[in-house]
Image (cartoon, rainbow, N blue to C red):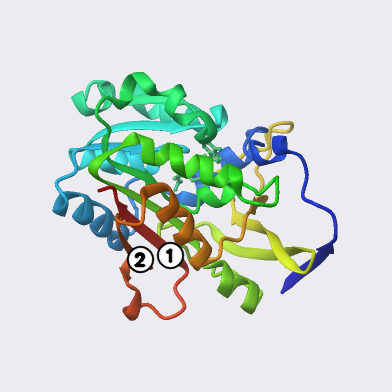
Amino acid sequence: MTDTIFRSRSLGTPAEGLRDQYADGKAARVWEIFIGDKNSRTQNYRNFLTGLLRSRGCKRILDVACGTGIDSVLLLEEGFEVVSVDASDKMLKYALKTRWARRKETAFDNWIIEEANWLTLYDDIEQHIGDGFDAVICLGNSFAHMMDSFGDQREQRLAIKNFEKCVKHGGLLLIDHRNYEYIIKSGSTPSKCLYYNSKHMIDIKTSVLFEAGKPAMVMLDYIIDASGVLRTRDSNKEDDVSEFRLSYYPHQLETFKVMLLEAFGTKSSYKLFGDFKSLEKAENPNFFIHLVEKL
Ligand SMILES: C[S@@+](CC[C@H](N)C(=O)[O-])C[C@H]1O[C@@H](n2cnc3c(N)ncnc32)[C@H](O)[C@@H]1O
């Protein structure tokens, strides 16, 4: 069941585009449960990501939305060198804990984790960029966290330009978003996520906010079965069901592709995947994954 909200005003100030939706710490705690065991990424996803990076000879990877560290850990375990950044200290806390717990493994001891925002990314991590990374990844529907505060997607363009500046010549950007066209048309979001093997997911409730007749924000309420794994902060009692909301900018496929090619130049090579397959093989995919090579 979808809720549809209509609004005629703009969505707010630039500060809203930068808002950390994980700041209260709750979504970060529940996200850890949602994504499940860090070792249990779906095999499809693991094969797709590592296969693609290896086939292009990538070794040094920048994960610009590392969150609690799930993709970065997968890549470190597979022998890649990783720099991980995120704007949310509440999410980074989990990545930092993992690095500390596994510090005796060389890959983890060398793992660089920094707090950085996509709008200032280049300046935030300049000392780690060198000649550029072999690949920059922004996965797990992360980029859609950035709203369109000015109504012309200028912050999103700036963020993508900053990603481009971190990629070396011949290097890659791998960036995804949910299939928002399908979500808006069907009014629902599939609760089985292709990326995670979560045993705790119950449902995702979908609300769409329209502004001046156009979809401007999609709000997803994640309903998680947290029995036995999450304790409430104030009481020490177990929560059976936990719910958290994340808001997303509903990217349109063609517009997104144009933004990428604007930042990387029209001569760059571009490929689109649906649910980790070539697009022809994926009907109404849940996720689109864009691959751009900087030439
Ligand atoms: C849905 S989480 C995904 C994290 C991880 N890739 C995964 O699959 O679990 C999205 C992450 O993007 C980060 N993020 C959102 N906006 C950001 C920004 N402007 N700069 C840096 N990180 C941002 C959030 O803090 C959050 O940790």
How many circles with numbers are drawn on the protein? 2
Q: Residue furthest right?
A: 8
Residue 39 in percent (x, y) is at 32, 47
Compared with residue 24, is residue 202 higher up or lower down, i.e. above or below?
Answer: below
Classify mark 2: helix, strand or loop: strand
Residue 170 appears at what percent x and percent y? 21, 45
Question: Nearer the observer, disc 2 or disc 1?
Answer: 2
Query: CB of mark 2 within 8 Å of CB of mark 1?
Result: yes
If you read the primary sequence from the N terminus, does the residue marked by circle 2 or circle 1 appear first? 2
Tell me the residue at 23%/21% (across/down): 104
Q: Residue furthest top?
A: 127
Q: Is residue 202 above or below residue 173?
A: below
Q: Is residue 218 above or below residue 58?
A: below
In this rendering, position of residue 213 left or right of residue 91: right
Numbered tag placed on residue 206 in the rendering = none
What residue do we see at 37% from left, 49% from top?
264
Residue 40 drawn at (x, y percent): 34, 52
Q: Which residue in the protein does label 2 denote?
A: 272
Q: Which mark is residue 288?
A: 1
Quarter the N terminus occupies = bottom right
- Amino acid type at circle 2 is Leu
Residue at x 55% of width, y 46% of height: 156
Inter-mark Cα distance, 2 to 1:
7 Å
Q: Residue at x 51, y 47 (%)?
A: 33
Is the CB of the residue bearing disc 1 within 8 angstroms of ligand 1? no
Task: Count residues near mark 1 (Cα–Cα under 10 Å), then give few for <14, some for 14-19, many for 20+.
Answer: many
Q: The residue under label 1 is which amino acid type? A: Phe
Q: Is residue 65 visible to us here?
A: no
Q: Is residue 268 left or right of residue 95?
A: left
